[in-house]
Image (cartoon, coloured by chain):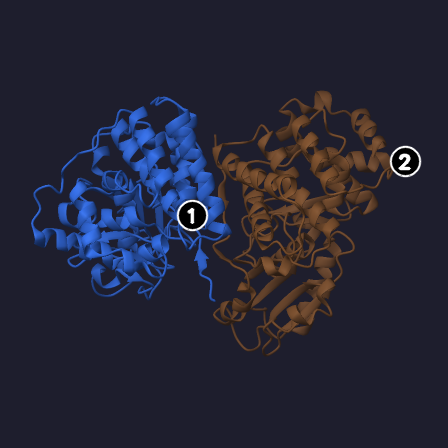
Chain colours: A brown, B blue
Amino acid sequence: MSYKNFPMVPRVIFGRGSFNQLDEILAAKRLSVNAPFIFLVDDVFKNNNELTSRIPLSYEDRIVFISTKEEPKTYQVDELVEDIILKTKAQPSGIIGIGGGSILDLAKAVSIMLTNEGEAKDYQGWDLVKNPAIYHVGIPTISGTGAEVSRTTVLTGPDKKLGINSDYTPFDQVLLDSELTKDVPKAQWFYTGMDCFIHCVESLKGSYLNAFSQSYGEKSFDLCKEIFLEKTYDASDVDSQEKLMMASWHGGMSIAYSQVGVAHAMSYGLSYLLGTKHGIGNCIVFDHLEEFYSEGVAMFKEMKAKHNIELPQGICAHLSDDEFNIMIDVALGLEPLWENAIGKNWKKTITREKLRGLYQKM
Amino acid sequence: MSYKNFPMVPRVIFGRGSFNQLDEILAAKRLSVNAPFIFLVDDVFKNNNELTSRIPLSYEDRIVFISTKEEPKTYQVDELVEDIILKTKAQPSGIIGIGGGSILDLAKAVSIMLTNEGEAKDYQGWDLVKNPAIYHVGIPTISGTGAEVSRTTVLTGPDKKLGINSDYTPFDQVLLDSELTKDVPKAQWFYTGMDCFIHCVESLKGSYLNAFSQSYGEKSFDLCKEIFLEKTYDASDVDSQEKLMMASWHGGMSIAYSQVGVAHAMSYGLSYLLGTKHGIGNCIVFDHLEEFYSEGVAMFKEMKAKHNIELPQGICAHLSDDEFNIMIDVALGLEPLWENAIGKNWKKTITREKLRGLYQKM
């Protein structure tokens, strides 16, 4: 038996207002005046002076605003890398992602592709990255995905939706400032928070679980329960914002020696075919997974009711056979997720018909 | 307000039997055939072939067995460093500590002092270390101290018992193999586990606490409660050994943005004067701290009763005024601990008389 030697984020700063310390952190990491920092920022902040005015820009540093209407794509990574190579005189000093899971994943992927040949799609999988990435910093502005701490960057490529899982993927530095999450709209807060909750259920119920992942998963689960069941939603509740940030962090860590499961596998299918965003996609799928996660799904339905969340219905109602097959192929391709959820013999019960039946309910 | 940019252990491997992977981990870090790995090993393992035969030795690598009868001393660090410099042709490839908190702290300190001038005592304090340490690996063989994950290495010097707190202190690699803890005697298991429990109480009740440290502290506290109150002691219970290992890890992390408190401050005094070992010293002190930590102390007494632990009594009964003053000086010198425990105005209530009164009960 061989155990994974897990790479952790080596530096983390946590605190309300800690975004103001970014300047100081980056100053120590600048390689030269020709080696800029590139800030990849969710374009929801484009006219948000409160944030943008505090992004420390010197020399050739620049901000690239990125739309997150769609899930991040491998070609988007390749375009960003090409643009950076064309416009900068030297290898950048670092890539700083400021946003949700999509932006954080793009920042991780771009930092990898600046030192590795070929295209991003070539590295979708496990441990395919050869060279260390350039210095990269993750600054989440919404909590739940765990992208700030994970060893993967999930991308939709021409053939598949799959992460670049590698020891070089995790950020070199993470900055956790809950103030950056204060303007997240309620529905988005819920969907992304549920990404974390669903992570935990899948990790804790999975066959890969060990005491390391369990302890992180349980803490994250407890925090989600407190925030989404015991407390009432309040956009000005700093304590909840900080706790959700930690739930996301621990939820991400719980995957270290574990895996996600059925909801993630099937929601990858939805995203690939329909472009469904990851957070809401997980919710749409998880809502129909009582047979796999009975207690978790019951709790999820309670949370949904408490916060008056209405999920889209019938999104698969008019799909063709070919379209169902595409989703099923993507979902079945995620073998470790199924093995974690169902066990080594998962292929006996998880048939194409089974998945089609589930997708048809959504 | 400025927040600490906390250095985390960048690599961790967790799993029963993962000690067998040490060879592979170190092979990738060897600088040259003249640059050995030095293994600092608790001498309790001296004739333990099961462990020593699995320490991977090549070229000039060597094992140094170290007695942990006493708390680690700054002069001990200096002697180890001098010995290493005299006997090796090149800067070592790394220092590997295999043992409890004392050995882990020595390994951290030696790795720092191999690249920093002067004596270990010069670096007791906060952020005094100038140069990065050499590669160092921590492998705990008993759970509870949190030394495997902390940013300090606690040493007794000529003037004080105080840690070398720095960004360069944390291990580059930690290996968590609960199998190495299977032969820990029951009393030692209890005292060292209580170090963790007391950490958590002090951290969670402290004024420095934030959501980051709280989430780790709560998880560690919950695990301690499960292991020491809900379960019965069983030397063959692998699940408990793994959970206690994680309790120690999370307990250490909970200090990241927090601090320990009254028990640690006062037990440092005991150790300095009487050489009392840290685990049992914390227990002796904590047993008398109802006024500061009423619930925590009540729970501690319950745990003590459940496991039939009898603490030494009257260890301060025959001390002279000078001796009391020495302990009080050491304890009062740990200002951040008191500020965390009592608040900014701690000097108003924590007088020399107060501490003497408490010590006299022990």
Mark 1 to mark 2 CA distance (whole Å): 48 Å
Q: Tell me: B161 left or right of A166.
A: left
Element class at badge 2: loop
Does residue B50 show up?
A: yes
Q: Nearer the viewer, residue B179 or A246?
A: A246
Q: Position of residue B138 (x, y in %)?
A: 35, 45
Disc sitting over residue A317 in the figure: 2
Q: Nearer the viewer, residue A140 or A167?
A: A140
State yes or no: discs 1 and 2 in contact (Cβ < 8 Å). Answer: no
Q: Residue at x 59, y 47 (%)?
A: A248
Element class at badge 1: helix
Seen in the picture, residue B215 relative to A328 is either above or below; the reply is: below
Q: Tell me: A265 left or right of B210.
A: right
Seen in the picture, residue A80 relative to A210 is either above or below; the reply is: below
Question: Residue flagged by tag 1: what amino acid is it?
Answer: Met
Residue at label 1?
A: B253
